Amino acid sequence: MRWPQTPLPVETPNGTLLVSIASTFAARSRGLLFTSRLDQREALLILPCSAIHTIGMRYAIDALFVDEQAIVIARRERLPPWRLASFQGARAVLEMAAGAAEQAGLRPGEVLRDLGRIVGRR
């Protein structure tokens, strides 16, 4: 994945994710469009965000909806191209390779402590 900043290491129940952050309008709008498939240990945090789409994408993704306390409140798995997904109350969305959320052990109720300061501010 190509993003301007160094990815943030985020601990999960089954290892470490390298999370890039899309917090500007341009970065949020672009999301994962025009990117190659993510590695199982890469993710993109879109913030603020409560709805995403995979229109124009070439591969399926997992989407974790996260609240302002960095708690996973919903998980959409293997979301194929040309779909929409949203979750009321989400503060951010963590986009991952299809199947990566399960592999990382991330389910609703899981707290992403390393993202707490980032998701909770603003």
Image (cartoon, rainbow, N blue to C red):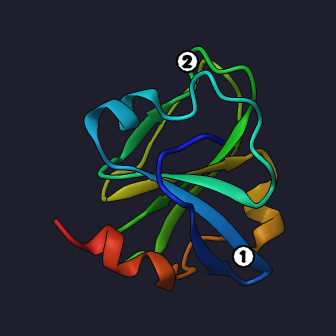
- The answer to whether residue 6 is left or right of residue 89 is right
Residue at horizontal 66%, vertical 28%? 35
Residue 29 image point, x, y percent: 38, 29
Image quadrant in which you'd find residue 42: bottom right
| Residue 37 image-quadrant placement | top right
**Residue 90 visible in this rendered orientation of the protein:** no
Q: Residue furthest top?
A: 56
Quick one: which residue is furthest to the left in this view? 122
Q: For residue 55, which numbered disc appears in the image?
A: 2
Residue 40, above or below 105: above
Q: Does 39 sit left or right of 110 as displayed?
A: right
User: Which numbered disc covers residue 51?
Assistant: none
> Residue 99 or 20: which is nearer the viewer?
20
- The residue lying at 32 percent from left, 79 percent from top is 117
- Please tell me whether mark 2 sits on a helix, a strand or a loop: loop
Q: Secondary structure at mark 1?
A: strand
Residue behind mark 1: 16
Mark 1–mark 2 distance (CA, rounded to whole Å): 28 Å
Three-letter residue code for mark 2: Ile
- Observer-nearest residue: 72 or 48? 48
The residue sitting at 28% across, 42% down in the picture is 24
Of residues 57 and 26, the one drawn nearer to the viewer in this rendering = 26
Mark 1: which amino acid? Thr
Where does the C terminus fall, quadrant-wise? Answer: bottom left
Give the answer, above or below, for where 70 lies relative to 31: below
Closer to the observer: label 1 or label 2? 1
In what quadrant of the picture does the N terminus appear? top right
Q: Position of residue 25 (x, y in %)?
A: 27, 35
